[in-house]
Image (tube, rainbow, N blue to C red):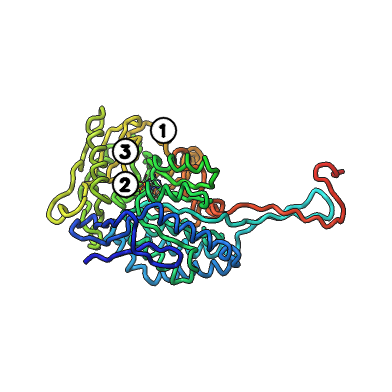
């Protein structure tokens, strides 16, 4: 019998969803039902928001160091349960164990970084332009935070949002993706065990249109932090714009890796393989375009195809497997439809993959073969649109300048990379690539929590997660002027 999971509202685990239940299925083995979850709707979202609103006063008045201690404790619990969580996550969404361990580790790192902010969260002091006057600023919490997350980083992404939101003094209503509700539940269990008081964190399972939209539209939710597709991000952006809500959007990507003629090709190939096919290409930072100098194009292409064809596909719980399934049947269909588009676009040549992987046990899941398209040009749809699967487009270029032009010819601007041994080119790439993240001699994936995470152009709305920059999403500034002169002083007027 599959486990039954519940919503967590006002410190209670509640069984019922007003729209019934939904099943969550292992994408590597469709016979394995991971759990049954409440299909919630507006009533559950409203109950969770009311609980979060009621808990806000007390939580926001608790010293930040105490809130941070609870988050630190949650990090310790995540660390103690890392292996169990990683195994559950692999079963739930297919990423190989090496990667799901990394996902949980990112949550642990985020807990410790956010907890540190409980003792920092610095404001400014500034000299006053008037005598006997003191000027300071500090960060204030905002209120109820609506947290809406995708399925591809089921622990890491929720922690990027929830942990700093809590340390800053906000209360939380969390709607995880319907493809990964079990790990979200484990995370909330950990927060409750770590000492988060009732109502401070609430979990509501269900669909985006029902629960997600109810959170976005509710006037008592004062800040929304969303990670997901650019299409949904635009809808949420419009709603939040109308109600002047704080909103952080982390959206799609079409990340490019440049390989110059002086690159260490072994390293560039290893990076390309990991960047394009890690997490089955289902990362916002996945390498989906490789822009290669013509002098090394043929060798790079031949070797990449050989390596991609040899990748071991299968159930990620087997430690020897290198690539898991697509998250669900719909996503695999979507990947395949892009492959069909690619096959019909002029000039592109599909050199490997392009099919469901169905040998032996693979037929039980939603596996897809690693796919390489060669001889692409930048205007093709497979070189422009986010595919979110194991498909990569190779684009030959004649020069460094052309490589920069091609990499920037994208609606998105999340991650990027260049392989070169020329320090001058590397520095020009750092300056000129239009992206939130640039790697030198590394793949487009592999961000660490200490630096800001996010992108430019259609990848978001200018906010950054991780680092101290995430505080800008979850706090408002208060400026304070303290006049101890005992008389009326007029700024800009009484200045000699
Ligand atoms: P998605 O946009 O379909 O869903 C994301 C979340 O939004 C889910 O919880 C979903 O239920 C909810 N949702 C859907 N419609 C909604 C609506 N109308 N109102 C409110 N909530 C709604 O994305 P996905 O398929 O879960 O994830 C893949 C996408 O996420 C890709 O585009 C990927 O690039 C992006 N992503 C971005 C980052 C980043 O940091 N930039 C990280 C990971 C994933």
Disc 2 designates what residue?
Answer: 276
Residue lying at 49% horizontally and 42% vertically, measured from the top left? 461
Separation of residues labelled 3 and 2 (CA atoms): 19 Å
Quick one: which residue is furthest to the left in this view? 360
Relative to residue 410, is residue 24 depicted above or below? below
Residue 441 location (% of width, % of height): 41, 48
Disc 1 designates what residue?
Answer: 409
Disc 3 designates what residue?
Answer: 296
Residue 130 location (% of width, % of height): 82, 50
Residue lying at 61% horizontally and 56% vertically, measured from the top left? 140
Q: Nearer the viewer, residue 54 or 369?
A: 54
Q: Earlier in the sequence, mark 3 or mark 1?
A: 3
Say few, some or many: other residues with alpha carbon within 10 Å of mark 3 (under 14 / 14 to 19 / 20 or more): some
Mark 2 C-beta to ligand 1 under 8 Å: no
Q: Earlier in the sequence, mark 1 or mark 2?
A: 2
Residue 228 location (% of width, % of height): 39, 47
Mark 3 C-beta to ligand 1 under 8 Å: no
Quadrant housing the N terminus: bottom left
Q: Nearer the viewer, residue 446 or 473?
A: 473
Say few, some or many: other residues with alpha carbon within 10 Å of mark 1 (under 14 / 14 to 19 / 20 or more): some
């Amino acid at each position: 019998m599959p486990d039954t999971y519940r919503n967590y509202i006002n410190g209670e685990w509640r069984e019922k969803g007003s729209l019934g239940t939904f099943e969550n299925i292992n994408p590597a083995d469709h016979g394995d039902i991971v759990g049954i979850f409440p299909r919630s709707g507006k009533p559950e979202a409203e109950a969770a928001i009311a609980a979060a609103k009621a808990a806000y006063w007390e939580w926001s008045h608790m010293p930040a160091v105490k809130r941070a201690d609870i988050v630190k404790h949650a990090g310790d619990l995540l660390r103690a349960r890392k292996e169990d969580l990683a195994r559950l996550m692999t079963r739930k969404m297919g990423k190989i164990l090496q990667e799901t361990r990394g996902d949980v580790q990112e949550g642990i790192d985020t807990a410790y970084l956010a907890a540190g902010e409980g003792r920092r969260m610095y404001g400014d002091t500034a000299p006053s332009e008037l005598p006997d006057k003191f000027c300071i600023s500090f960060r204030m919490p905002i209120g109820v935070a609506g947290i809406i997350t995708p399925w591809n980083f089921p622990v890491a992404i929720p922690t990027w949002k929830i942990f700093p939101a809590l340390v800053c003094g906000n209360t939380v209503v969390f709607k995880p993706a319907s493809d990964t509700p079990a790990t979200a539940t484990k995370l909330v269990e950990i927060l409750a065990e770590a000492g988060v008081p009732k109502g401070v964190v609430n979990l509501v399972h269900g669909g985006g249109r029902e629960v997600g939209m109810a959170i976005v539209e509710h006037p008592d939710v004062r800040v929304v932090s969303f990670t997901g597709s650019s299409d949904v991000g635009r809808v949420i952006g419009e709603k939040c714009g109308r109600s002047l809500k704080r909103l952080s959007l982390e959206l799609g990507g079409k990340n490019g890796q440049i390989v110059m003629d002086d690159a260490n090709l072994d390293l560039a190939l290893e990076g390309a393989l990991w960047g394009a096919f890690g997490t089955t290409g289902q990362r916002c930072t996945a390498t989906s375009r490789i822009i290669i100098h013509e002098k090394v194009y043929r060798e790079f292409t031949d070797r990449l195809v050989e390596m991609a064809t040899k990748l071991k596909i299968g159930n990620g719980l087997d430690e020897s497997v290198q690539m898991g399934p697509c998250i669900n049947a719909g996503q695999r269909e979507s990947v395949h439809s892009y492959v069909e588009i690619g096959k019909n676009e002029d000039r592109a040549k599909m050199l490997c993959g392009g099919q469901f992987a169905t040998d032996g046990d693979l037929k039980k899941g939603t596996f897809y073969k690693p796919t390489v398209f060669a001889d692409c040009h930048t205007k093709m749809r497979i070189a422009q649109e986010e595919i979110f699967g194991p498909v990569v487009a190779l684009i030959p270029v004649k020069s460094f300048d052309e490589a920069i032009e091609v990499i920037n010819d994208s609606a998105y601007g999340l991650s990027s990379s260049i392989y070169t041994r020329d320090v001058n080119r590397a520095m020009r790439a750092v300056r000129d690539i239009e992206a939130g993240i640039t790697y030198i001699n590394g793949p487009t994936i592999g961000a660490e929590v200490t630096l800001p995470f996010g992108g430019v152009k259609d990848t978001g709305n200018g906010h950054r997660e991780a680092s101290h920059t995430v505080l800008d999403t979850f706090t408002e500034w208060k400026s304070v002027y303290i006049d101890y002169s005992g008389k009326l002083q007029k700024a800009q007027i009484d200045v000699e």
